[in-house]
Amino acid sequence: METQKRDAWSSNFGLVLAATGSAIGLGNLWKFPFITWENNGGAFVIVYLVCILLVGLPIMMAELLIGRRSQKSIVGALRDVAGPAWKFVGGWGVLCGFILLSYYTVIAGWSFFYFWKSLGWTFGGFPADLSTGDLFGAQVGDAWLQFMLSLVFSIATVGVVYFGVQKGIERVAKVLLPVLFGILVLLLVSALGMSGSGEALKFIFEPRFGELEWSGVLEALGHSFFTLSLGMGAMITYGSYISRKQSIVKSAGAIVAFDTLIALVATIIMFSVIFSVAGLSEEVGKSTVGMLFISLPELFYTVMPFGTVLGPLFYVLVALAALTSTISLLEVETSFLIDERGMKRQKAVIVSGAAIFVFTIFAALSFGSTPVLSTMVAFGKTGWFSIADHFVSNWMLPTGGLAVAIAAGWFMTRKATEDELVDGNQPDWFRYGAWRFFIRYVAPVAVLAIILAVILGRDFS
Ligand code: PHE
């Protein structure tokens, strides 16, 4: 079926940047601070770090190695390394990417709105009588605006993936990621100078194990899949563009380390700002989107040093981080159509981008502008967006991750995985044995625990 020459990263650096870009996204800036808040920081953060290390890292290595071994996107990859029936698991991943991208784009689009608004405040001053809560409500309730924001973001994603792995994805990641790091450093410096930073650091890092509930442990585990882009084939697809010369162990380590660092830094920044305003910290935690789009916009202009400059930059950061993630989601769909349907890249990108956008419209209109979509109820969630997010986070990613662990740990031969991981070195416990133990036993048991908890009624979205 392979008629076109397969794309590849130009270097190890290209892979690490693109995959780090995929991992760093709304999960780090929007979800992680919120669930850290919800679970009382401290112990939750430690448990999250343990999950990343014991489950996330081994599965990251598994996805990259499955990709490189097969040189195919998720459906063909799982079929090649684990057996014919595994193509259905691959299909599950493609479907998951489809749904995830369709609603992720909506929040990503909001960053454009807030960038535009904050730019106006930077030059025109922050209106004293403005309620950012009302502004938010008006923004999400405006159907036409929601449609346009999502459309522009979708076009940006399609525009990058259209140009392929090296000329599109890698090139964009090489420019965007350093910019993203730069903006984050500026924000961090300013945030650490604020009066609330000490309290913020204490909240995030002081272990208070008495306060952590068992459900929080499982939530940390679930989020480690979301934040590392695992469980739906993004890293398998990116792994399929790695050449034989590159080290999977080192790349996986770097991607995981960067993603974790950024999640922590983003949380420190947000909490420093929030803790600097007396009384505010009580309210913020109440809504998932509240922190990013209701509290912060105002705080940039009222309390944060250099906030007038940093405000617009922050929303550029959100947009860039989201874009490098949506790119990887669309690449999963695109590479599936290229590998399994023999389509040309350009056609595959446009076909999948357009199909996904139809569903993006549903998500975009489900924040109040369209009653049917905003009030529908399923799985105890209200509104199309929340239902989709619930389904993906609670069911699709964990089951996908479990399948990957089983494929790599139990269906692939020891020789095959060893070949991919040891890079011609002597396989020893550190280079190989530890991974094998974690992928066969630790990761599946942990993931099964999440799924069990979900079945017993716990919500991770
Ligand atoms: N990791 C991304 C984030 O944290 C989300 C994502 C999940 C991207 C799965 C691609 C695949 O925002």
Image (cartoon, grey):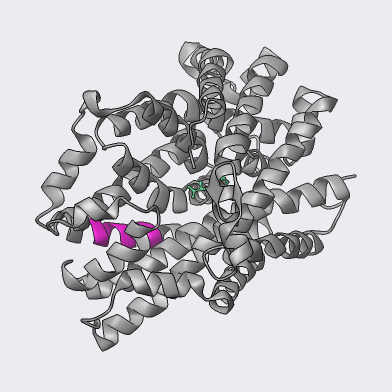
Asked whether the viewer can see residue 25, the reply is: no
Magenta segment main secondary structure: helix
Q: Is residue 294 magenta?
A: no
List the single residue furthest toward the right: 1
Residue drawn at (18%, 72%) of the image: 302
Q: Which quadrant of the structure image shows residue 49?
A: top left
Highlighted range, magenta: 179-188
In the image, 158 versus 204, the foreground residue is 204
Q: Horizontally, is 396 left or right of 217 in the view?
A: right
Residue drawn at (49%, 43%) of the image: 461
**Residue 4, position as x, y percentages in the image:** 83, 53
**Residue 301, position as x, y percentages in the image:** 22, 73
**Residue 287, position as x, y percentages in the image:** 37, 53
In the image, 112 versus 171, the foreground residue is 112
Q: Which quadrant of the structure image shows residue 46?
A: top left
**Residue 371, position as x, y percentages in the image:** 59, 66
Residue drawn at (51%, 45%) of the image: 16
